[in-house]
Image (cartoon, rainbow, N blue to C red):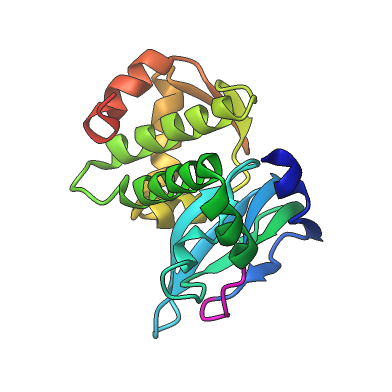
Amino acid sequence: MLRELHCLVEHVGPYEAGQHIFREGEAFTAIAAVRTGTVKTSVVDPAGREQVLGFFLPGEVIGLNAIHQSRYPCNAVALDRVTLCRFSFPMVATLAQRLPDLQAQLFRLLSQDIGKATLLAGDYTAEERMAAFLITLSRRFAARGFSPRRFLLTMARTDIANYLRLAAETVSRLFRRFQDEGLIRVDRRDLEILDEARLRALAQPILRN
């Protein structure tokens, strides 16, 4: 399977911070795995207000939510220097018909994408949302071979606030409070989780595990 997928891959980038990888409404032709950097997805309402939908780390796939409508339903923007592995979706779909393992992996990726989109949809407190965001980031970094306890927050505080549906001032206050309580250590964008158990307990109403 890997040999056949290798024939489909196109290495693209780098994209610099602020550059669009795709725009809402563009025709959907490919999915892409992030090789390096972080990608933000968002939509803009008729009044010009941005709504952040998610952040994609190295090893994660962008573009899956475009499959149904055959157009990208959101914007994807590089938050730092980003490189991608891009796969022609029509070719991947054809190959998946012959390779059950590939088809199963696509279903898993779609399931993860839906799960991330609904993670913060409930009526949760600001503290629960922030804790769940940090624990989820930790788990995603760990799944990709990075440190689960210390990592860079490549997204701006305003983007985190937008994603969590909180005020930017609330996010800044929560970072200070979590640090004062010994849950985390923050130095600009460098974050270290100091008490994972307490942070996980705070996030439990959202994450459930």
Residue 152, position as x, y percentages in the image: 64, 35
Exactly how many numbered labels are in the figure?
0
In this picture, is 194 found above or below 121?
A: above
- The magenta span reads 24-30
Is most of the magenta stretch helix, strand or loop? loop
Residue 4, position as x, y percentages in the image: 72, 47
**Residue 127 lies in what quarter of the image?**
top left
Residue 53 appears left or right of 124 = right
Residue 38, position as x, y percentages in the image: 64, 49
- Point out the residue furthest to the front here: 98
Viewer-proximal residue among 64 and 14: 64
In this picture, is 156 found above or below 3?
A: below
**Which residue is located at x 60 percent, y 63 percent?**
89
Asked whether 28 falls inside the magenta stretch, the response is yes
**Which residue is located at x 72 percent, y 59 percent?**
17
* Residue 37 in view, yes or no: no
**Which residue is located at x 41 percent, y 27 percent?**
178
Quadrant location, the N terminus: top right
* Residue 195 in view, yes or no: yes
Residue 77, position as x, y percentages in the image: 62, 63
Asked whether 12 falls inside the magenta stretch, the response is no
- Point out the residue furthest to the bottom here: 46
Viewer-proximal residue among 30 and 143: 30
Quadrant location, the C terminus: top left
**Which residue is located at x 44 percent, y 42 percent?**
108
In this picture, is 64 found above or below 132?
A: below
**Residue 133 lies in what quarter of the image?**
top left
